[in-house]
């Protein structure tokens, strides 16, 4: 099988959570979220800057250019620290928030996360064992072009070998 090359430039391009198109530069994207003022935050999304106004009742937003790099990470961690963790745990907001941190700060996470779906059993989400950028890149290269199908309650990879369809269980990264 030919290896697949990542399509996104790590830490410089992202998928918009509203339209799923590529945000090609951090200056063209924003993080939007609802902040209830009483310590509650939710609905964290990375969107095109032009779409951030379309989200309606967004109370807060920040340019991605201010959230990348060391200063951006420091801001996000301070933001998490300012809000009680209980408020982040409500409505999966904590998962959303920490996913945003990984999307903005771990190379290859943004593209690899779109491939995690097939590692899910449907009942419990697969928890990747490592967010090491080398493993994430290898994961993208391995599964980026693969086709998957549900067989006997499990996901199998389908590929063509010598003119015939072959299936195999996907390897966990």
Image (cartoon, rainbow, N blue to C red):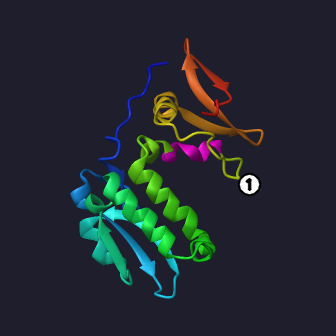
Rendered position, 121 above or below 52: above
- Can you give x and y, in whole percent of width and height, for residue 160 in the image? 55, 20
**Is residue 116 rendered magenta in the image?**
yes
Of the pair 48 and 158, the residue shown nearer to us? 48
- Can you give x and y, in whole percent of width and height, for residue 156 in the image? 66, 33
Of the pair 118 and 153, the residue shown nearer to us? 118
Q: Secondary structure at mark 1?
A: loop
Residue 69 falls left or right of residue 33? left
**Is residue 4 rendered magenta in the image?**
no
Q: Which residues are magenta?
A: 113-119
Asked whether residue 16 is in view, the answer is no
Q: Quadrant of the C terminus?
A: top right
Residue located beneath label 1 in the image: 123
- Can you give x and y, in whole percent of width and height, for residue 170 in the image? 64, 31
Q: In the rendered image, which quarter is residue 158 located in? A: top right
User: How busy is the neighbourhood of tag 1: few (under 14 within 10 Å), some, or many (20 plus)?
Assistant: few
């Amino acid at each position: 099988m030919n290896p697949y090359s990542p399509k996104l430039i790590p830490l410089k391009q992202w998928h918009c959570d509203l339209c799923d198109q590529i945000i090609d530069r951090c200056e063209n994207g924003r993080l939007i979220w609802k902040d209830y003022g009483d310590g509650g935050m939710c609905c964290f999304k990375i969107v095109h800057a032009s779409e951030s106004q379309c989200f309606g009742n967004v109370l807060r937003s920040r340019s991605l250019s201010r959230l990348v790099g060391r200063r951006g990470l420091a801001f996000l961690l301070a933001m998490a620290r300012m809000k009680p963790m209980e408020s982040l745990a409500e409505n999966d907001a904590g998962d959303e928030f920490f996913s945003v941190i990984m999307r903005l700060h771990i190379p290859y996470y943004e593209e690899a996360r779109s491939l995690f779906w097939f590692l899910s059993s449907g009942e419990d989400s697969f928890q990747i064992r490592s967010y090491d950028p080398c493993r994430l890149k290898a994961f993208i290269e391995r599964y980026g072009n693969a086709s998957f199908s549900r067989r006997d309650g499990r996901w199998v990879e389908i590929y063509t070998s010598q003119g015939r369809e072959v299936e195999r269980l996907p390897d966990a990264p």
